[in-house]
Image (cartoon, rainbow, N blue to C red):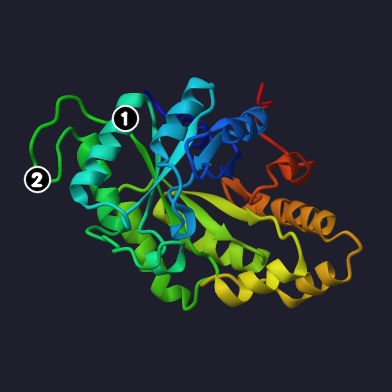
Amino acid sequence: MTSILRRKLDAGNFVVTAEVCPPKGCDCGEFREKSHALGKIVDAVNVTDNQGANVRISPLAPAALLLRDGIEPIMQLTCRDRNRLALQSELMAAAALGVTNVLALTGDHISFGDHPGGKPVFDLESVQLLQTIAALNSGRDLSGARLHGSTSFYAGAAAAPAAEPFEITLPKLAKKVAAGAGFFQTQAIFSPDCLARFAEAVHPLGAKVIVGILLLKSAGMARYVTNRVPGLKVPVDLIHELEDADHPLDTGVAIARRLVAAARPYCDGVHIMALGKEELIPDILAGLARDDDHD
């Protein structure tokens, strides 16, 4: 099977992806309903992997359920919770179920989540995970042994456009591309100038750039993101705009919509992170010029 996301990006289409968090439990009904509602307006749905180091169902099952529902998933896979054997097993299982897109992540440290006493693994990190995916795509495992059937993943990686100093970040991004990353999905951006700098530096690497857009629900959330999330800083003027708003969530949607419009000239797509407010994604995308009609 081939990745529809890859085909669209290679064709030069501007894509939209969105993140839907799998359930903390085995009932995937709400997850499927939210994803189904997005199916007509996004090109792929990211299925997170124990996001923020908080335990949830493995992304493998929800990704397979999305495929059953006719929605293309991007299965996120972190190195935090699995050694190299488990990662390869998970990837081969995903390929057998028809998953074609994988976002390779190192993963947040386990101390940030709801099981801080657990033991992190980190047998590999994100560049090595990308190399693992490339090996499986070539029909061999990490030890060089031939597989019964090769995978055909379209691999992606994370990027942090606002991370400083950026001169240190750029070589790591180049390593990810050399290891097989065909696209980047970035952390949230709030500054078009920052995005322009990032796009100018990264596009020569040959990877597609899908820019992260975070829905800010309140001024408190904006301050939390600034103070607690590494690499993210919400500009003061946006925090004041949320503080002064009669309806902060509506203002957050308007800010996200402006950021989508500002990002459009510099990237190959946008990745919407609505954090439980996925029903507002159509409003965030209102007015976005697309390259196809998404029938």
Above-or-below relation of 180 to 191: above
232 or 85, which is in the foreground?
A: 85
Please name the residue shown 71% across and 43% down the image: 281
Q: Quadrant of residue 216?
A: bottom right
58 or 190, which is in the foreground?
A: 58
Q: At which x and y percent is residue 16?
A: 61, 40
Question: Which label's residue is closer to the chain start, 2 or 1?
Answer: 1
Q: Quadrant of the C terminus?
A: top right
Q: Quadrant of residue 291?
A: top right
Classify residue 114 as left or right of residue 133. Answer: right
Residue 152 shows in this picture: no
Q: Amino acid at mark 2?
A: Ser
Classify residue 203 as left or right of residue 41. Answer: left
Q: Which residue is mark 2?
A: 143
Above-or-below relation of 149 to 106: above
Classify residue 281 as left or right of residue 98. Answer: right
Q: Quadrant of the N terminus?
A: top left
Q: Amino acid at mark 1?
A: Ala
Please name the residue shown 41% across and 70% down the image: 169
Considering every residue shown, the one lying at the far right of the view is 246
Disc 1 crowd rating (10 Å Cα; few below 14, some 14-19, many 20+) is: many
Disc 2 crowd rating (10 Å Cα; few below 14, some 14-19, many 20+) is: few
Q: Secondary structure at mark 2?
A: loop
Q: At which x and y percent is residue 163?
A: 50, 72
Q: At which x and y percent is residue 68?
A: 48, 21
Q: Which residue is mark 1?
A: 95
